[in-house]
Amino acid sequence: MDTKYNPSEFENEIYKKWEDGGYFHADVIKDKKPFTIVMPPPNVTGQLHLGHALNNTIQDIIIRYKRMAGFEALWIPGTDHASISTEAKVVNKIRSQGHTKKELGREKFLEEAWAWTDEYGGTIKKQLRTIGVSCDWDADSFTMDENLTRAVKHVFKKMYDDGLIYQGDRIINWDPEAETAISDAEVYHVEKEGNLWYIKYFFEDSDEYITIATTRPETMFGDLAVAVNPEDPRFKDKIGKNLVLPIIGRKIPLIEDSYVDMEYGTGCVKITPSHDPNDFEVGARHNLGQCIVIDSKAHVVEGYGKYSGLDRYEARKLLVEQLEDEGYLEKIETLTHAVGYSERTNVVIEPLISKQWFVKMDRLAQLAIDAYRSEELELIPDSLGKTYMNWLNNIRDWTISRQLWWGHRLPVYYTDDGEIIVSEEDPDEEGKLNGVHVTQEEDTLDTWFSSALWPFATLGWPIENEKLDYFFPTDILVTGYDIIFFWVIRMVFASIYTTGKVPFNHVLFTGLIRDPQGRKMSKSLGNGVDPIDVVNQYGADALRFTLITGNSPGNDMRYDENRIIASRNFANKLWNATRFVLMNIDEDDDLVFDDNTELALEDKWILKRLNNVIEEVSRN
């Protein structure tokens, strides 16, 4: 052994020997007990970050232990097609070449997306090898592989036939940057300081008015009523009378609805059915209709004079100025409120009525609730059970359609007469299904719809096979607590619904890795750490040992380079201890220990300590 510990000289070589030797491969061996883990699939075009390194190190420890303990241990790796983020990168690439997505057309754009995936898709897998993960690369999967695509179509049709999937006009979260719908789980909220504008709405042919308060004055273009609580005595003699919408001049009625909290604000609420989920419900109860005033790019639509074509915030500024100039603005208050952002593009979402495809969640949510209550599913730490149950008890129908081209296109077809056909089979060369000419739905599915099938689709489901029978359900999932809604819950109900089985017995949640000041790592702060840089400087063992010491399930941890250095020094001690032993034995020495070996006291002491460690590790 070299006198100096230099991991870069041997770590890659060791990993190559492991992989070439097939030591990570798992097969169906009936006289052995199986143990299965599925890797949370990182984005196909992503880069390894410290969260991946932590997550995969924990999985690696578990799978290696089970492998050595005599289990037939399968660890399934893979990547996710990440529809929104990958499409955004491809759009930027073709834009830099002087083209637009629309100019290319769907087929050419998808060729570009596959080329991008082929070019960058292997990066993170190479990086995972660099940190030493022992997954079965023969089982490597991609969410758009043929077998996973088959599973997606099968589940979509099953849900549609069971009445769980429907198409409808509903208020959804709209991402104006990606120009697509996103689900509730893809929205994060930030407490921000903003304004509350108090605006006078005058009654028709009268100097009397009521005052409404709003944080989004630009949406008043779409107001179709003002609502008050039916128990509120202040407005009893005004119900049914018309108000005149400031600036626009539209006549809108004053209506009663128990949705309104008479104690909050002025007790009067402007009703904008096309741009607010609660207003949508009020509008439906009172047959108010719809009035879309913000478009897919978050600009004011045509028909509103100088405001048309303006960005929502430009329109807001100009509108507030006009309201003040014309005497409609009563006052402005500052407030702190939660603003919804798209998890995918980090822009403020726009609630917007849109025709989308949805999954009914009542029945599916109950499946996930029952699995947790029956203790078939254990969450570690158990404190996250409250988060799990709270989300399921307050769940809304899941918006699954996306206005994107990269991803699984909905297996929905329209006949020339407008009839809807859902089919797992593709149309023939003439564009016909069952002899009828059809046109396929343009939208693609939410990425999480396909990744919800990950634990069983990666094993060949829905085609029955012995690998699926042997390795499924899986045993443990290791993932970050931040995707409990996106992925964990969806895997639970999707698996029970399709296979009748809970997909894993345990979920071990990791926390986030923050910088030394406790801040979340981000590009904007410039405080991110590249795990590969750490490996190149200190070695994979130093990185892995740092990540799994001083760490507890579900809790965030702080990255500290001094801890990395201490871990490197510890590895160096092991290296030197090994060198010391090898220097002090002869190759001809008999180093075989058996029941007849005479052991010195210090040998017995060391073996006793070793056995204690083995017992404690096994128990834990």
Image (spheres, rainbow, N blue to C red):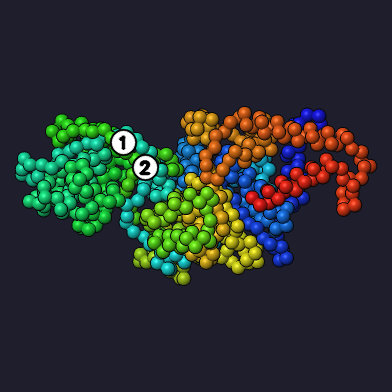
- Image point (32%, 33%), residue name: 193
Q: Position of residue 64 (x, y in %)?
A: 69, 50
Disc sitting over residue 151 in the figure: none
Inspect the image, locate mark 2, and give the three-letter code of the amino acid beneath it. Gly
Q: In this rendering, is residue 257 above or below 583?
A: below
Along the line of sight, which residue is nearer the eye, 548 or 51?
548
- Can residue 412 be seen from the camera position used here? no
Residue 257, relative to residue 522: is it above or below? below
Residue at the spot x=94%, y=42% of the render?
A: 588
Task: Report the residue marked by disc 1.
Answer: 336
User: In the visual, does 615 lie left or right of 338?
Assistant: right
Residue 340: mark in rendering: 2
SS state under label 2: strand
> How far across and how far down the image is residue 552, in percent?
56, 43
Left or right of 536: which side holds 325?
A: left
Q: Splitting the image into 4 quarters, where does residue 282 fall? A: bottom left
Q: Is residue 515 visible?
A: yes
For numbered disc 1, what is the local secondary structure? strand
> Does 451 appear above or below 323?
below
Residue 493 higher or lower than 207, as above or below: below
In terms of image quadrants, where is residue 163? bottom left
Q: Are marks 2 and 1 in contact (CB under 8 Å)?
A: no
Q: Residues within 10 Å of mark 1 (few under 14, many from 20)?
A: few
On the picture, is 596 further left or further right than 541?
Answer: right
Quadrant position of the N terminus in the picture: top right
From the viewer's perspective, is the residue at label 2 or at label 1 nearer? 1
Image side of residue 546 versus residue 220, left or right: right
Task: Determine the residue positioned at 69% across, 32% down.
Answer: 568
